[in-house]
Image (tube, grey):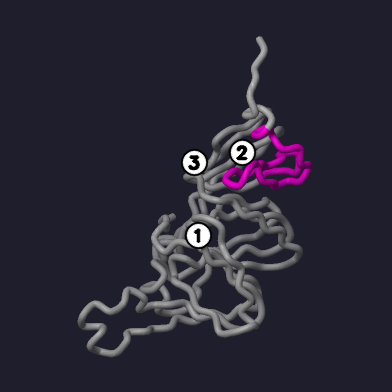
Amino acid sequence: MTLYGALFQQFAENTSQDQFSLQGSKMLKINMGFGPVWSRSGAMVAYQGDVRFEKKSQGAARFLKSAVTGEGLDLMKCSGSGQLFLADLAQAVQIIYLENDMISINGASVLAISDSIQWDIKMIKPGAGMAAGGLSNVVCQGTGYVAVTTAGEPVALNVAEAPTFGDPQAVVLWTAGVQMNVKVDTGGLGSLLRGGSGETFQLAFGGQGVVVVQPSEGFHFSS
């Protein structure tokens, strides 16, 4: 049987040999030959070969933090051989390679983490929960890959160039060296009583590093 059409050439599987690579802009391809990975539960859309999925507990300490902060990660361990494809509601996928480095990520944006990366739920700032829907972010540290999702194409802002502020639901992650605080902008008591502008709580960034912001304030998923 002969099939014709650009579909089979334009969307053919990529040939990258990296552990994490993009399949289009909204799908992550993982080469399982590099070892196990952690992925968001339910994110598997396809695989080839022999890939096994195991639901893992976060551990007692992480579970307690999750219950308090609402920022727990529902992850599954993926192991075996072949290729694994992950996606989350057709959001854009961004790949980051850490080399003995650290990033802080909104838990709702985590798609996959190399098994070589250490991750934990960390308090970001007292009072930030009211602004960001939780008191913590997921901190990933070490050497390996992290894949995150964004609602559209994000912007990476260098916080050393100017004071930088972001909507809590639009901020995806920030790198090591970035300092974060919560800014309360009521517009005065009268504005607060009338409901304000809808931008009351903002995240304020300084220091050295990059903040990644997605072009959406409402496309936010609880973990």
- Residue at point 56% right, 58% down? 153
Q: Quadrant of residue 177?
A: bottom right
Extreme right residue here? 17
Q: Quadrant of residue 35?
A: top right
- Residue at point 22% right, 88% down? 190
How far across and how far down the image is residue 34, in percent? 75, 43
Amino acid carrying mark 3 in the image: Gly
Q: Is residue 59 visible?
A: no
Asked whether 131 falls inside the magenta stretch, the response is no
Name the N-terminal-most of marks 3 and 1.
Answer: 3
SS at circle 3: loop
Q: Which residue is mark 2?
A: 85
Q: Nearer the viewer, residue 103 or 15?
A: 15
- Residue at point 64% right, 55% down? 146
Does 153 sit left or right of 10 as displayed? Answer: left
Extreme top residue here? 1
Are dots 2 and 3 in contact, CB under 8 Å?
A: no
Name the N-terminal-most of marks 2 and 1.
Answer: 2
Q: Nearer the viewer, residue 69 or 88?
A: 88
Q: Which residues are magenta?
A: 10-36
Name the N-terminal-most of marks 2 and 3.
Answer: 3
Q: Is residue 27 above or below residue 179?
A: above
Could you give the CA–CA distance between mark 3 and mark 1, rounded to whole angstroms? 15 Å
Q: Which residue is mark 1?
A: 107
Amino acid carrying mark 2 in the image: Phe
Amino acid carrying mark 1 in the image: Gly
Q: Which residue is mark 3?
A: 42
